[in-house]
Every structure is written in structure tokens, then in C-alpha cells.
Amino acid sequence: MRIVVVGGGAAGLSSGLLLARAGHTVTVVDRALLAPAADVESAAAQAFRPSAPQVVQPHVVLARGRQLLAQRLPDVLDALLAAGAVESTLADELPPTLLDRSPRPGDEQLSMLMTRRSTFDWVLLHAAAGQARFTLSGGTTVTGLLAVPGPRPHVRGVVTDRAPIEADAIVDATGRRTPVAAWLAGLGARPVSSQAAECGLAYFSRHYRCRSGVPLPGPAASRVLMALDEFTAGLWAADNATMLFAVAPLVADHRFRAVTDPDVFNAALRTVPLFATWLDVLEPSSGVYAMGGLQNTLRRLVVDGSPVATGVYAVGDSVCTTNPTLGRGLTLALQNAADLVGVLAETGDPTAAALELDHRVGQHIEPLFRDQAETDAARLTELRHAVFGDPLPVLAAHAAERLDFARLRAAAQVDPIALRRFFRLFGMLEEPESVYADRKLVAHVDHVLRAADLPRPAQPTTAELEAAL
Ligand SMILES: Cc1cc2nc3c(=O)[nH]c(=O)nc-3n(C[C@H](O)[C@H](O)[C@H](O)COP(=O)(O)OP(=O)(O)OC[C@H]3O[C@@H](n4cnc5c(N)ncnc54)[C@H](O)[C@@H]3O)c2cc1C
């Protein structure tokens, strides 16, 4: 098939590579130039683009994403490691409060990949440049769809600010602000199914470099995410001795309005003792990048059992976005891309393919969207209680029969069984509901939480935080 992929971000490039390797002729079109930079440092220096501002934010490739790369794009995984990406093993992730630190069979599956997003995209661009049946058309904006209009339009290409491109199928990889639903509606299609759940956080991040020869206070592949009383903050190791910090307060928490000032950013982080020890050995290498408008979203092109259009598929953020603190986006995009390629190998019928891809979105993506929506609702309630004094809800009656993300994470701080199930959930190796509804695990976590004196992370008082801000 001739396939046009609209959008050359991580989802578009990985889908394009997989599709070309499956024998399709692929053109990836992006409004950005997307020429691979000379090296990863140049790629990082020129990474920011308004059409994909998240590329300068911290990124981790979760265990399931690393597994998908190893299975489906092994050359890309090898090239990432050769470009300096580092693997964070479970041993790197063990909380200091865990007493039983012995390794267990299966721990090796839980490793994640730590890399700057610009390095990830740089490696994908290089792979694309050497790929047969793959054309990258950078600097080209898609402005609409070529289609047979009607109540269920059949898409047969794209209109661009240059020449139209005809295709047997198009893939929407335009990211979180996808215009495709509006284009389809303009052709007479029914509205796509669109769900949203509040994520409620603003994201501020900054890049740092490890000083050469200076010992680090933790593993070089560290990833530390702290759900503190009044905000969330984290440290992400990345390729080539770089590290990124992020501060994620409630959007409505205006005490953080000055955190875009690099000194205020550092001061806020220094209120957390663990982060202060890291800041002592790191050299800042960027300003503070801010990102708002974060939402959990799920868009589906099949509504009430029938596709709103044929000849059009979607992958990546245009299908689903989730709270970035849990780092699910790239892994969902890789899963989505693998599913698309599998579906197109199984059937050439556009209606059957649309239905089957949507079925796999229901299997592989929707459970993560729902989990994120539920986890975020609970966390937002906690934060709003701590910051604004909003009331806490009464616990639901079923709470003792089912786990949630926060309870499992709390038990994982002190218990090796809970820790491993938590990392299987976090790494997207196991579906949320199979973890939360596991009776044995529910009882075990309950026991751990009753028996243990749970550690609280050392963190600032309100007065200390406000002084820093
Ligand atoms: C703050 C933050 C932190 C994150 N952290 C993580 C993390 O740790 N781990 C993780 O896995 N995920 C993370 N994510 C999510 C991850 O960034 C996204 O899932 C990922 O970027 C999705 O890639 P994409 O290719 O779908 O979209 P994008 O990367 O946004 O790419 C879309 C592309 O489409 C192009 N485009 C759009 N419209 C047009 C048009 N009309 N014509 C031509 N081109 C067009 C754009 O130029 C862009 O290049 C994070 C996200 C945010 C916001």
C-alpha cells in the first residue's frame, strides 16, 4: 500500500519505519524540517519546536516500550544505546526504605531506557533516512484530506501547502492537537469519539549535566518521581551524562508562577533534601521549559461499532495522551504502531482494518487511559486538599477489595512483592485491572500497609516552600 503518515514525531517515525519494513511505501510528512542534526548534542540544542513542545521535557521509555523496541525495532534500540541512552534496572530504582534488596528472577524485564527525547527522535530520524520505501517530507504542512465525501468519507490522500499526495491509506500522527477530527467533520463524517479527564498539572523542567569526575549521590541511571504533599517533582537521568529535573504543581497553584526563573526553579527543588544532593553535583545546561494544557485524552475513529471514515488510521498522541509524570506516551505510541502494522498485514479491507485497530485500542490503550484518569483524580484531590484545603472524599466501599496506584506505590516502598508488581504496572507490562483486582495482592498490600511504619519522603514545610518560591 502507499501510506502517508501525517506527523514525523516519535509515533509517526516509528509507525513509518514499521510500515516500510512490512513492505508498504511510506511518506512521512511534517511541517517541521526534521533533518537529522549532526550529533545528539546539536539535536538537543535545536530540539524545541512549537508544534511539539514536549520534546525538551524529560522522557523515559518504560519497560514495555523497551521490550517493543527490542522485538520490533532492535536496530533502533541498539542505536539508542550506542548514542548514549542508559538502561535503568530495577536495582537502580530500589527505594532506600526497602530492606530486602535481593534480586529476583524476572527483574531484568523491568529495565527502562533513559534518554533525552531529542536523542530518541534523532535515532529514529537516522533509521528513517536509511530505510527503503521511506520518504521523509519535512517542511510540509498538511492542510486537509483528499477524500470521497459523505456520511462515511473514504480518505485517499492529503492536501498540503505544496502538492497533494495520493495514498491508499493515511495515518494521523499529528499529536495531541490533531486537526483530523475537524477535517473529517468537514467532509461530512460523524464526530469521532473523544474522552478527556483532567490531569491538572503544569510542567516545568530543566536540563543539567553531570560534572565530570564528581561522584553522584545515586545511580547514574536514576529516575526519581516524588508525589510530595504540595507538588510533584522528579529527576530523570538521560543519555550522555545529562539529567533533567521537573517540577509539576497544580495548574491553579499560583505560588509557582515564578518557577520559570532558573534560580527559583533550583530553590524549589532544593527544598527536597534528596534533590538538593543531586543539584550539588549537576551543572545546569538550559533554562526552564514550561508546559501547560496537559490532559488525559482518548480519541477513537470507530463510533457505535462503525468507523467514522475509512482509509484513515491514527497513532500516538492523536489517539491518547496521559499524564506525563508516568511516562506512558512513547510506549503507547509504539504499541499503537505495532498494532497498526499487524492489522494492515491481516486485512486489506479498510472497514475491517479500522474496526480491528479500534478493537486493539480498546485492548491496549483504553485501560491505561482509564487508569490514568482514576489515578489523577485521586492525586488531584490530595493536592487540592493540601494546597487549598478542599475536602477529602469519603473512601468508596469497594476500596478494600481493589487496589489503586497510590496504595500499591506506598507498599512498594517497603515490600519486595508489592515493589515488583508496582514496577510491572508502572512499566506497562501488566494491565492495571489485573494488578488492582488480584485478591492475593490486595490482601498482601493491606497487610503491608497495616504492619509497616510507612516512610514519608523528606520534604519542605509550606513555609519553606513558599520562601523558596
Ligand atoms: C511534559 C511531557 C513529558 C512527557 N514525558 C514522557 C515520558 O517520560 N515518557 C513517554 O513515553 N512519554 C512522555 N510524554 C508523552 C510523549 O511526549 C508523547 O506521547 C509523544 O510525543 C507522542 O508523539 P507523537 O508522535 O504522537 O506526537 P508529537 O511528538 O507531538 O508529533 C506530532 C508531529 O506532527 C506534526 N504535525 C502536526 N500537525 C501537522 C500538520 N498539519 N502537517 C504536518 N505535520 C504536522 C508536528 O510538527 C509534530 O512533529 C511526555 C509528554 C509531555 C507533554
Image (spheres, grey):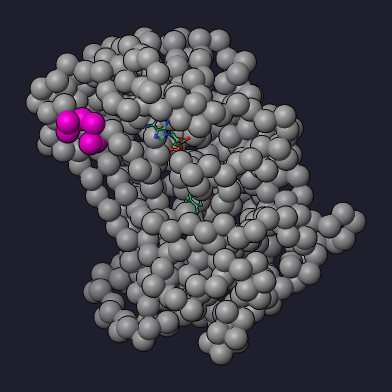
Residue lying at the far left in this picture: please name it. Answer: 151
Find residue 377 and report its horizontal and vertical position in percent: 33, 66
Q: In the picture provided, is 249 more to the left or to the right than 152?
A: right
The answer to which of 248 and 63 lies nearer the viewer is: 248
Above or below, comparing residue 329 to residue 142 in the picture: below
Magenta stretch, main secondary structure, is helix
Name which residue lies at 71% across and 44% down. 239
Residue 447 drawn above or below residue 191: below
Quadrant in the picture for the N terminus: top left
Given residues 260 and 114, the one toward you in this image is 260
Q: Is residue 82 left or right of residue 198?
A: right
Residue 340 visible to the viewer: no
Q: Is residue 441 above or below residue 157?
A: below
Q: Residue at x 75, y 71 (%)?
A: 277
> In the rendered view of the protein, which quadrant contains the C terminus?
bottom right
Residue 183 falls within the magenta-colored stretch: yes
Q: Residue at x 57, y 57 (%)?
A: 289
**Residue reaching furthest bottom?**
463
Q: What segment is highlighted magenta in the picture?
A: 181-186
Left or right of 439: which side holds 115? right
Q: How many marks?
A: 0
Vertical position of residue 193 compared to residue 274: above or below = above
